[in-house]
Amino acid sequence: MNITITGNLGSGKTSVCEELKKAGFEVIKTGTIFREIATEKGVSVIELNELAKTDTSIDKMLDNRSTLLGRQKDNTVFDSRMGWYFIPDSFKIFVLTQIQESARRVLGDLERAAEGYRDLNEATEGILKRTRLEQERFLELYHVNYYNQSNYNLIIDSTYATPVEVTSEIIREFELYKMEQFTGKTVFLNSKPETIDRAAYFFDFTEYK
């Protein structure tokens, strides 16, 4: 029984995965698998990224390895954009954040300084552009809408919540899932569902409660 976790840009997913690791879960990131493939091929990660632009076998290798690990592992968290797709028996989580808050986090993240956003508006536009490109890419490669609610068991809003609060909710819901007492839902932490402006998110909430 594994967890796959993804989210929109700036959702705080990486911090949540660090908290899940502290809670005793093994965390496997797509980047780690990608680095392993680069090592096996005797090239750098940058070189492998360049190769992947024209060699589709690299993406397939990454996807196949994710699927295999999903079958071999237990009580493991897969931090992966498409983990929910390649590990279909997992507890599938999407960490959701309002676009403006995503932009604020990205703008203040020193590790993202290379992205070069000058202010909140520029960061917002950049995130929206990358999100649309990402959506188009996944539609082309896998014929799925990454931002469709029906892909996930749990959609959890981190806009007004700390990584610790998000992690606690994930663990609680995962335990219910393992006991077959979980029903798919959206959790808005620290805010009332009736006050939520769903237009503030880049996400398809159709028929999801």
Image (spheres, grey):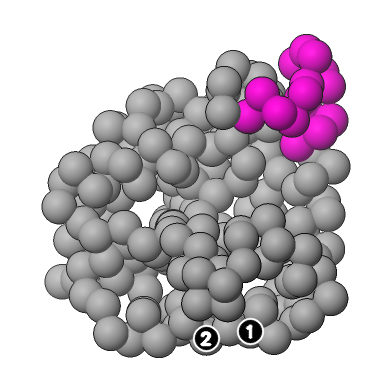
Q: Is residue 26 left or right of residue 190?
A: left
Kind of residue at disc 1: Lys
Query: Looking at the picture, does residue 82 appear above or below residue 68?
Result: above
Q: Quadrant of residue 9?
A: top right
Disc 2 to disc 1, how far (Cα)? 6 Å
Query: Is residue 135 at all visible to an observer of this figure?
Result: yes
**Which circle marks residue 186 in the picture?**
none
Which residue, given by chain and number where applicable, does mark 1 sit on?
A: 60
Could you tell me which residue is drawn at 54 percent across and 38 percent down? Answer: 11
Residue sitting at 26 percent across and 55 percent down? 173
Query: With respect to residue 155, does 34 lie above or below?
Result: below
Q: Amino acid at mark 2?
A: Asn
Q: Which residues are magenta?
A: 112-127
Residue 138 rendering spot, x and y as whole percentages: 74, 69
Number of marks in picture: 2
Q: Nearer the viewer, residue 57 or 123?
A: 57
Where in the figure is residue 32, as x and y percent of width and height?
45, 61
Quadrant of the image occupied by residue 29: bottom left
Whether residue 117 is in magenta: the answer is: yes
The quadrant the N terminus occupies is bottom left
Q: Residue at x 19, y 43 (%)?
A: 22
* Residue neighbourhood size for the residue with mark 2, other residues' Cα within 10 Å, grouped as few (<14), some (14–19), many (≥20): few
Q: Where is residue 120 drawn, in percent x and y?
A: 75, 16
Which residue is tagged 2? 64
Mark 2: which secondary structure? helix
Which residue is depicted at the point 40% across and 86% down? 68
Q: Are marks 2 and 1 in contact (CB under 8 Å)?
A: yes
For residue 51, side relative to residue 11 (left or right) = right
